[in-house]
Image (cartoon, coloured by chain):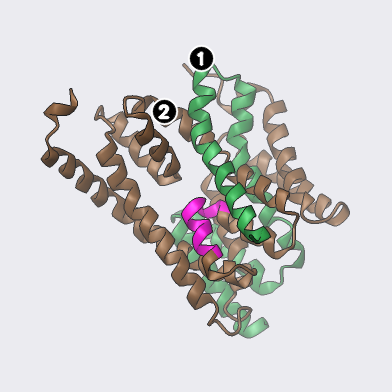
C-alpha cells in the first residue's frame, strides 16, 4: 500500500482509534504521574526538574528509582546507571517492535522508539498479532495522550507535593517500596521468577548491611541476573524458542 | 546547570538507548543465546527486588501489613489495585502504630 492511497481521513481515523486505546493507560498511569511529582519534590527535586524528568525520560519505574536514589544522595553516575538498569527491559521491546515499524521513515521510527513504554509495546504487539499493520498515525494516537498526560500530571503532582504537610502520616515515604513490590509481583509468571527474587532479595540485604547503600542495588540485581544465566536453560523456559 | 539537570539528561539518553538499542543491536542477531535471554528476562525482577528487600529491615507493623496486603491483592488484581490496597492499609495502620 503506497502513501498516496492513504487519505488524510484514514490516517485521522487510525490516529483516533489509537487515542481510544490509550485511554485506559492514561487513567491507570495518572496516579503514578502525580505520585512521581510529589515524591520528586519530597526527595529534593524542583517542580521544573520533575517536569523535565517526566518529559525527557518518560519511564515511570525508572523515574521513581532515580528520585529515590537522589534522595539518598547516591553518586550521580550510579543514579544514571540505575535508571539504565531499570529501563533495560526496553531493549527487548525494541527488538520486538522493530519488525513492526521497520517500514516507517527513519524520523518517525526515532520518535516511535522514544515513546516505547510497557503498555505501548503490549498494545502495539497485540495489534500486530491480529495481522493488522502498526501504522505511525495509529501508534502516535496510542502514545501521545499517555505522554502528554504523564508530563502534565507529574508537574501537578510536584506543585501539590509541596503542600503535603505530614508525609509520614500519609505514608508518602513508604509508597515506593509498595509500588516496587507491585511491579516485582507483576513479573511473577516469568521463568525463574522466584529464585531470582529470592537471590536478589537475600544478596541485596546482605550487601546493604555490609557494603552499604546504594551498592546493594547493583550487587543484588547482578546476583539475581547471574543466577538466571547460570541455571540450566531448561529451567528458564527460553530454550524452546523457534 | 545543576547536577540534577545533568542526571536527568544522562538518564534520558540512557533510557533512549534502551528503547532504540534492541532494534539496532539485538535484531542483527538471528539467535540470542538462551542464557543471555534468561538473564535479560531476569533483569526487571532482580533490580526492583533490591529496592524493596532492604526496606524490610526497618519495616514496622504498618509497613509489613501494607506489603502483605499488596502481595495478597496481587494474586487477583492489577498493579493499580495492588498499589491502592497497600497504600490504604499503610495510611490506616500508621494512624494507630505511627
> Which residue lies at the image location 67% right of the left edge and 32% below the top edge?
A228
- Residue behind mark 1: B30
Q: CA distance from mark 1 to mark 2?
A: 14 Å
Task: Give residue B39's quadrant in the image.
Answer: top right
Which color was chain A given? brown
Q: Is residue A181 visible?
A: no
- Local SS, label 1: loop
Magenta part of the protein: which range? A49-62
Name the quadrant of the N terminus of chain A: top left
Q: Position of residue A131 (x, y in %)?
A: 25, 27
Chain for mark 2? A
Does A154 sit left or right of A229 as displayed? left
Dot 1, crowdedness within 10 Å: few (<14), some or many (≥20)? few
Give the prevailing secondary structure in the magenta stretch.
helix
Q: Is residue A15 magenta?
A: no
Is the residue A158 above or below the residue A96 in the image?
below
Q: Which residue is mark 2?
A: A98
Q: Secondary structure at mark 2?
A: helix
Amino acid at each position: 500500500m503506497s502513501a498516496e492511497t492513504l487519505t488524510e481521513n484514514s490516517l485521522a481515523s487510525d490516529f483516533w482509534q489509537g487515542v481510544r486505546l490509550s485511554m485506559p493507560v492514561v487513567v491507570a498511569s495518572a496516579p503514578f504521574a502525580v505520585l512521581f511529582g510529589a515524591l520528586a519534590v519530597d526527595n529534593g527535586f524542583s517542580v521544573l526538574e520533575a517536569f523535565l524528568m517526566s518529559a525527557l525520560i518518560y519511564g515511570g519505574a525508572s523515574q521513581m528509582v532515580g528520585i529515590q536514589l537522589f534522595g539518598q544522595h547516591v553518586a550521580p553516575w550510579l543514579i544514571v546507571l540505575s535508571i539504565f538498569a531499570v529501563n533495560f527491559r526496553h531493549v527487548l521491546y525494541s527488538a520486538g517492535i522493530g519488525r513492526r515499524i521497520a517500514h516507517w521513515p527513519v524520523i518517525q521510527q526515532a520518535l516511535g522508539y522514544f515513546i516505547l513504554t510497557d503498555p505501548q509495546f503490549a498494545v502495539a504487539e497485540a495489534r500486530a498479532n491480529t495481522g493488522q499493520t502498526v501504522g505511525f498515525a495509529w501508534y502516535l494516537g496510542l502514545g501521545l495522550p499517555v505522554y502528554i498526560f504523564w508530563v502534565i500530571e507529574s508537574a501537578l503532582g510536584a506543585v501539590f507535593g509541596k503542600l503535603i504537610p505530614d508525609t509520614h502520616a500519609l505514608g508518602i515515604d513508604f509508597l515506593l517500596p509498595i509500588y516496587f513490590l507491585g511491579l516485582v509481583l507483576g513479573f511473577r509468571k516469568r521463568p525463574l521468577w522466584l529464585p531470582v527474587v529470592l537471590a536478589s532479595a537475600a544478596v541485596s540485604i546482605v550487601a546493604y548491611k555490609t557494603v552499604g547503600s546504594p551498592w546493594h542495588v547493583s550487587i543484588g540485581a547482578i546476583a539475581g541476573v547471574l543466577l538466571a544465566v547460570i541455571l540450566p536453560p531448561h529451567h528458564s523456559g527460553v530454550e524452546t524458542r523457534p | 546547570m545543576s547536577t540534577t539537570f545533568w542526571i536527568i539528561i544522562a538518564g534520558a539518553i540512557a533510557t533512549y538507548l534502551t528503547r532504540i538499542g534492541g532494534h539496532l543491536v539485538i535484531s542483527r542477531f538471528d539467535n540470542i543465546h538462551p542464557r543471555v535471554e534468561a538473564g535479560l528476562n531476569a533483569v526487571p525482577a532482580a533490580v526492583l527486588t533490591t529496592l524493596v528487600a532492604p526496606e524490610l529491615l526497618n519495616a514496622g507493623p504498618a509497613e509489613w501489613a501494607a506489603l502483605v496486603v499488596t502481595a495478597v491483592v496481587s494474586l487477583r488484581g492489577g498493579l493499580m489495585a495492588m498499589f491502592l490496597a497497600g497504600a490504604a492499609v499503610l495510611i490506616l495502620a500508621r494512624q494507630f502504630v505511627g
